[in-house]
């Protein structure tokens, strides 16, 4: 394609990659050469476009695969988080239940400790009573033995007096 032909120029002009000659025969030859060159450039550009399209498709495929991988990983992490939260809630519920049972057991322990203290006081009182009763019993036993000896001695004395 001839961009500009100037009449009267013997050697021609060079513009935009085209040589413009004044003679029509020479111009046609250069136009034919430029057409072949343009066809080569077009083919080269088409190869580059084809290469870039393939690269773009490969890049898009890789990006799509990466998105899928990241979505899967996100789902896995979300599932793990939900499981941990559920586990945490279960542990919190179990912890609250154990704390409640612990408070109930502590309350029972306090009640039983108070009951044990009361029973120990009662046992101490009864032991004191038993000790006092034993002491009283020994005193009574001594008194009865003393009385028995006196009566036995008196019976012996009276029995001897009767025999006389």
Image: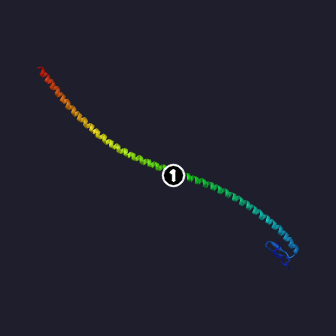
Q: In this view, does 143 lie above or below 114?
A: above
The residue shown at (42%, 47%) is 104
**Residue placed under numbered mark 1 in the picture:** 89
Hey, which residue is sitting farthest left in the picture? 164
The N terminus: image quadrant: bottom right
Position of 73 compared to 151: left or right?
right
Hey, which residue is sitting farthest front in the picture? 162
Q: In this view, does 147 lie above or below 48?
A: above
Q: Residue 33 lies in what quarter of the image?
A: bottom right
The residue shown at (25%, 36%) is 133
Q: Residue 144 lies in what quarter of the image?
A: top left
| Residue 121 rendering spot, x and y as whole percentages | 31, 42
Q: Residue 114 lies in what quarter of the image?
A: top left
Q: How crowded is mark 1: few (under 14 residues within 10 Å), some or many (20 or more)?
A: few
For the residue pair 13 and 34, the one nearer the viewer reads as 34
For the residue pair 28 and 121, the one nearer the viewer reads as 121
Q: In this view, does 23 lie above or below 137?
A: below
| Residue 67 rendering spot, x and y as whole percentages | 65, 57
The residue shown at (32%, 43%) is 118
For the residue pair 155 and 22, the one nearer the viewer reads as 155
Total marks drawn?
1
For the residue pair 60 and 42, the one nearer the viewer reads as 60
Hey, which residue is sitting farthest top in the picture? 163
The residue shown at (86%, 73%) is 27
Element carrying mark 1: helix
| Residue 162 rendering spot, x and y as whole percentages | 12, 21
The C terminus: image quadrant: top left
| Residue 152 rendering spot, x and y as whole percentages | 17, 26
């Amino acid at each position: 394609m001839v961009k500009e032909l100037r009449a009267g120029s013997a050697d021609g002009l060079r513009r935009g990659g085209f040589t413009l000659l004044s003679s029509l025969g020479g111009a046609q030859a250069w136009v034919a050469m430029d057409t072949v060159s343009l066809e080569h450039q077009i083919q080269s550009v088409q190869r580059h476009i084809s290469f870039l399209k393939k690269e773009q498709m490969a890049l898009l495929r890789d990006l799509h695969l990466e998105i899928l991988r990241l979505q899967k990983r996100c789902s896995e992490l979300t599932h793990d988080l939900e499981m941990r939260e559920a586990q945490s809630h279960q542990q919190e519920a179990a912890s609250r239940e154990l704390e409640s049972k612990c408070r109930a057991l502590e309350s029972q322990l306090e009640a039983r400790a108070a009951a044990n203290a009361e029973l120990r006081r009662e046992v101490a009182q009864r032991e004191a009573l038993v000790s006092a009763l034993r002491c009283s019993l020994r005193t009574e036993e001594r008194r009865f033995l003393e009385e028995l000896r006196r009566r036995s001695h008196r019976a012996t004395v009276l029995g001897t007096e009767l025999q006389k």
